Structures are given as C-alpha cells and as structure tokens.
Amino acid sequence: MTSEAAISVVAGPADPAAFAPFGAFVEPPLEVGGRARFDDWLEPVAGLAPSYHLNRAPASTFPVTVRRVERHPHAAQLFIPVGVSRYLVTVMPADESGAPDAGEARSFVVPGTMGVAYRPGTWHTGISALDGESSFAVMMWRGTEDDDVFADIPAVQILAGNGDLLG
C-alpha cells in the first residue's frame, strides 16, 4: 500500500488582504459605543431562510491535519467566536472543475476578537479551536439540499508558523 505525503501549509496571522479572495475577517468597532455592521455578508438569498446556531469546536494542536472540506454554494457563512482565545481558519480555491484545490490551501490563525465571513462557494475546513474547546455563533442562509457540500481532499498538514498569534 502506498500513501501520499501530506501537503504542508504554514499557518500565518489573520491577514485581511490575503484572505480577501475567500471572505473577510470581521472585527469589533474601535470606539466604545460604536457598531461594526456585517449586513453585506448576510444579504437575503431568494428561496432561502436565515439560519442561526452555535457550534462547539474541539480543541486542536499543531500540526493539524485535514482531509475534508466543505462549501456553501448559495450563501455566505459568518462565524463569530464566543469566549475563544484563537482559532485556525483554512481555505482553498476551487480548481477548474470546481473541486477543492488542496495544493493551494491557505491557513490563518485568527484571534478570538475577530470573526470570519466566508464568501459563497468558498472551500474551507471546519474551525479548529487552538487553546481549548470553543463556541462560535454561525449565521447563514439555508433552504436547499446542497446548502452544505463536502469533499474529501488529499491530507493537508497545517504547521505552526512564527509570530505572537501562533503561541
């Protein structure tokens, strides 16, 4: 039996410009009493209904290996951390056929003070909480059989990078 070597990706800090093709990091307002609005990420989608729930993500440690990704082709998906220290977000573009391109995976360590919004159709892994089990409020639109599309991928091993956010 042969096995392929895992694709290695070094996690970097949450970089809004690098993440922009996949979505956005959402941050709280800078001023006390201010509001940070994310309405543009949650615009109504014809035929779909709003869905709000809490996820509980298991604790993870580096290296993190992923073999499955998901996407939501009809609507953006917004995660807001609830009592989270930091977490790992891993995304990848689609190849020419629309399948996930694991060789182009990108991974970001996100502080618990920031949320994440995925663009519709963005291939991503489940959230990995880095410092203990954590909860996330999740908002999106649902209503079709293919709201959640899953795909198996070659193993992607996410390694800790350098920097303050990486512990």
Image (spheres, rainbow, N blue to C red):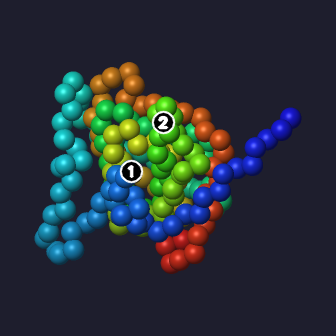
Q: Which quadrant does the N terminus fall into?
A: top right
Residue 85: tell me if it is visible: no
The residue lying toward the viewer, choosing from 144 and 74, is 74
Label 1 sits on residue = 22
Image spot of residue 89 (x, y percent): 47, 55
**Which quarter of the picture shows residue 142?**
top left
Say the numbered circle drawn on residue 126. Answer: none
Q: Residue at x 25, y 66 (%)?
A: 28
**Screen quadrant of the C terminus:** bottom right
Label 2 residue SS: loop
The three-letter amino acid code for the residue at tag 2 is Glu
Q: In this rendering, would 110 be left or right of 102?
A: left
- Quarter holding residue 157: bottom right
Residue pushed farthest left?
Answer: 33
Residue depth check, mark 1 versus mark 2: number of the one nearer the observer = 2
161 vs 53: above or below: below
Viewer-nearest residue: 151 or 103: 103
Question: Is 145 placed above or below 60 here?
Answer: above
Instruction: Tell me residue 20's x, y (percent).
Output: 35, 57
Q: In this picture, is 82 found above or below 122? A: below
Q: Please identify the residue farthest to the front as the structure is shown.
A: 96
Residue at left 50%, top 39%? 95
Tell me the tag on residue 96. Answer: 2
Classify 10 Å Cα crowding around label 2: few (below 14), some (14-19), many (20 and above).
few
Examine the image and state in which quarter residue 154 appears.
Answer: top right
Circles 1 and 2: CB atoms closer than 8 Å: no
